[in-house]
Amino acid sequence: MNFTEEEIKNCSATKGDLLVCEGGAGYGRSAIWDKEYDICLQNHVHRLRPLIEGICEYVYYFIYLLKESNQLASVGTAMPGLSANRLKGLLLPLPPYQEQHRIVSKLKEVIPYVERFSETEDALSRLNSEIRVYLKKSILQEAIQGKLVLQNASDEPSSALLQRIKEEKLCLVKEGKLKKKDVIDSTIFRGDDNKYYEQLSDKVVDITEDIPFDVPEGWSWCRLKSICTIFTGATFKKEEANTEKKGIRILRGGNILPFEITFKADDIFLPYNAIKENILLRKNDIVTPAVTSLENIGKMARVKDDMPDVTVGGFVFVLRLYFSNDWLSQYLLALMSSPTIIEYMKSITNKSGQAFYNIGKERLATTLLPIPPLSEQQRIVNQIEKIFSEIKGN
């Protein structure tokens, strides 16, 4: 930018000047300009130019003290700031010139230790706040790998459960509630060569590279689409919403927290006749955002009871089991919330705009799931609930 001589005189900084922020969240933040060339300043930066060379460092530390002890903010204003009059009026305890240098020298010696301690304290605070999340993720990962509870050889194998799900799907086809093409499931098995194969009709494919880990005896691998259907909810225009907050409540991504569905004051409601009955939420449905920020991928919650007055919006997935079972539903929630599945979900997302990601429905349906026997699912779910309760209590 071009400046007039008057602007350069009044708004420039030269080596040795102390610069102090005037307003905003960083008011009072300061630094000494130590470069050999001059710069011009924006009008919300104060410039303090020493009348005697070498005193700015002492003043810098003094302002640093006031800033850290919250003694700098202007009063009587909505936005905290450090006005020129407030800065000029600061009372400064001024030691002899030589003592200023001794003080600055000592502060330069000890401040790095203080900053290191502060960084360590911040890291510990972050760990304390995040450790419960890390513990829960570890528990879920142990659970889906068969390491959380003991296996019982007398349990009916999960292959029997998968067969019951196939039979249930055939019944739905006969009732006209399911298309015949949705009954064509793949079968995943382990060969004599210890490799994993997937059979679909007469075609057998080696999928060993896709299997993330081995599972215990009695467990099975299957695709997500083999045990549930995936659909999105209602699409609508804002003007169609019921301003009286009556009718069918529409859940959006913000309503879904890990393991919890919440209602919000700004929830949208649509008239009853605008919603198809088959997308109303049912017991054991799993809901998760289809479009969300990258860090929120994997936020899922389970519908604990039928919700005849609630559905989801067009940017939320519903995972509905073909064979509705409490233990299978609760295990599926834990499974889909585990690090392995969340990382897979992140790998199948597409950028949607600047900050959002769209999860691919078709690829989500092909997610590989480790399925334990139904009895073991119950033991896993009970153990997860017990440990999560203890983590929350701590």
Image (cartoon, rainbow, N blue to C red):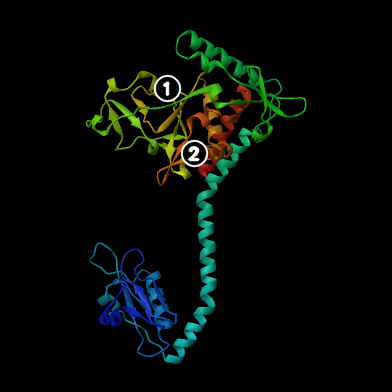
350, 175: nearer the viewer: 350
Q: Position of residue 272 (x, y in %)?
A: 28, 21
Q: Secondary structure at mark 2?
A: strand
Image quadrant where residue 89 sits: bottom left
Q: Position of residue 392 (x, y in %)?
A: 51, 42
Q: Is residue 201 left or right of residue 362?
A: right
Instruction: Pick the quarter of the image with the N terminus.
Output: bottom left
Q: Secondary structure at mark 1?
A: loop
Q: Is residue 327 left or right of residue 12?
A: right
Identify residue type, mark 2. Answer: Thr
Q: Residue at x 41, y 74 (%)?
A: 64
Q: Which mark is residue 282?
A: 1
Q: Position of residue 360 (x, y in %)?
A: 48, 33
Identify residue type, mark 1. Answer: Arg
Q: Residue at x 77, y 28 (%)?
A: 193
Question: Can residue 377 be seen from the camera position used here?
Answer: yes
Q: Earlier in the sequence, mark 1 or mark 2?
A: 1
Q: Which mark is residue 43?
A: none
Residue corresponding to mark 2: 349
Image quadrant where residue 73 sits: bottom left
Q: Is residue 363 left or right of residue 160?
A: left
Residue at the extreme right? 193
Question: Can residue 89 be seen from the camera position used here?
Answer: no
Q: Marks 1 and 2: which is nearer the front?
A: 2
Numbered marks: total: 2
Label 2 neighbour load within 10 Å: few <14, some 14-19, many 20+: many
Label 1 neighbour load within 10 Å: few <14, some 14-19, many 20+: many
